[in-house]
Image: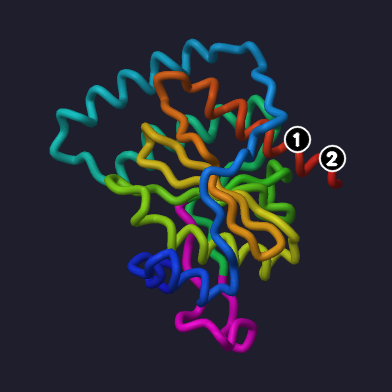
Amino acid sequence: MSFSEYKDYKASELEEIFKIHIKNNELLFNHFKPSGETYSTLQVDVKKMSSRLRLSKFDNEATRGSLLVSRILWESGVVYNLGVFFEPPVNLSSEETPDLPHQLNGKYDGALSLDEIDFSSPIISVVDVKKSSRSDGLGQCIAEMYATLKEFKQDKVYGIITDGEVWEFLRLENAILSVDENNYYIKSVADIVDRIGYIAGIFKKGC
């Protein structure tokens, strides 16, 4: 519950709460090189899922997370040998974050780690699923990224906010939250999978 308690804060309020600076339109993938893979089976699958969701009365965050998001994350994990975790719990005591208005505990929608088996450091990205406006997920995603740095003693972590069709990438490092200048779309699912691979590569180089 506590992570979601940050979802209604404005960006300026989040900067003050977490003592960070938010920088928009950043180049998070300026050294990115596409793999050349098309992931054709995945592309067909997500196109079918997306078209069905648009007609369904059950188009909600849970359904999108279970179908679109999990399918793309799983493919990324297989291709780049990553651990893929859904609703992993993280619990920080109020004593560890005494200056925050809400305790940092609860479950992430999803997370990726270099360890394929265990939910352990380094956590390369947390994933927040939102059905509508991705700005609604900013506060919750920042809270989860901040908690990751605290819990796993990391100096950086990436975040993903997505409705399953549009993917937005963020990075929290040195008290700066950088938001990538571009969004990425499932009509070109390779753009998403290979960027997750790019993030994994950054962490692997640091190990």
Q: Amino acid at mark 2?
A: Lys
The percent coordinates of residue 57 (x first, y second) are 13, 38
Q: Amino acid at mark 1?
A: Gly
Q: Main secondary structure of the magenta part?
A: loop
**Quadrant location, the N terminus:** bottom left
Task: Say if the magenta span includes residue 19.
Answer: no
Question: Disc count in the image?
Answer: 2
Q: Are marks 2 and 1 in contact (CB under 8 Å)?
A: yes
The percent coordinates of residue 201 (x first, y second) are 75, 35
Q: Quadrant of residue 47?
A: top left
The percent coordinates of residue 125 (x first, y second) are 60, 48
Residue at screen point 25% across, 45% down: 60
Q: Quadrant of residue 52?
A: top left
Q: Secondary structure at mark 1?
A: helix
Residue at screen point 19% across, 40% down: 58
Residue at which label 2 appears: 205
Task: Say if the magenta span includes residue 97.
Answer: yes
Q: Is residue 30 left or right of residue 76?
A: right
Residue at screen point 74% across, 61% down: 154
Q: Is residue 110 left or right of residue 54?
A: right
The magenta stretch is 91-109
Residue 201's disc number: 1
Q: Secondary structure at mark 2?
A: helix
